Image (cartoon, helix red, strand yellow):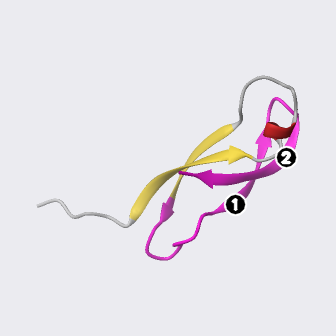
């Protein structure tokens, strides 16, 4: 019998990349525990297009 877990996959998208004229987007896929973290998460991740670490926010 399968149990439903509390961990879900979320997509993180760069917030600074939208303001530039460079093409493409920086996105990462990670998991979070929906029971412990109900709000949207923000993590600092590397953006290869901008070549620096930027803040990535959860989308959708």
Label 2: few (<14), some or many (≥20) within 10 Å? few
Give x and y (percent) for residue 4. 26, 63
Residue range corresponding to the magenta coloring: 32-60
- Find disc 1 in the rendering and name its residue: 42
Q: Does the residue at mark 1 contact the one at mark 2 (Cβ under 8 Å)?
A: no
Mark 1 and mark 2: Cα distance apart in space: 13 Å
Give x and y (percent) for residue 37. 53, 72
- Find disc 2 in the rendering and name its residue: 53
* 52 left or right, relative to 18: right
* 15 left or right, relative to 21: left
- Quarter of the image containing the N terminus? bottom left
Give x and y (percent) for residue 53. 85, 46
Instruction: Look at 53% across and 51% down and name the residue there.
Output: 60
Q: Is residue 49 magenta?
A: yes
Determine which quarter of the picture holds residue 48.
top right
Q: Secondary structure at mark 2?
A: strand
Q: Is residue 45 above or below residue 40?
A: above
Determine which quarter of the picture holds residue 39.
bottom right
Determine which quarter of the picture holds residue 18.
top right
* 34 left or right, relative to 26: left
Q: Is residue 44 above or below residue 20?
A: below
Q: Is residue 49 above or below residue 18?
A: above
Give x and y (percent) for residue 20. 88, 33
Instruction: Look at 51% across and 62% down and name the residue there.
Output: 32
């Amino acid at each position: 019998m399968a149990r439903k877990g509390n961990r879900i996959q979320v997509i993180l998208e760069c917030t600074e990349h939208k303001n530039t004229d460079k093409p493409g987007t920086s996105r990462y896929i990670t998991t979070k525990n929906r029971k412990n973290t109900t709000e949207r998460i923000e993590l600092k991740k590397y953006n290869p297009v901008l070549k620096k670490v930027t803040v990535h926010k959860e989308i959708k």
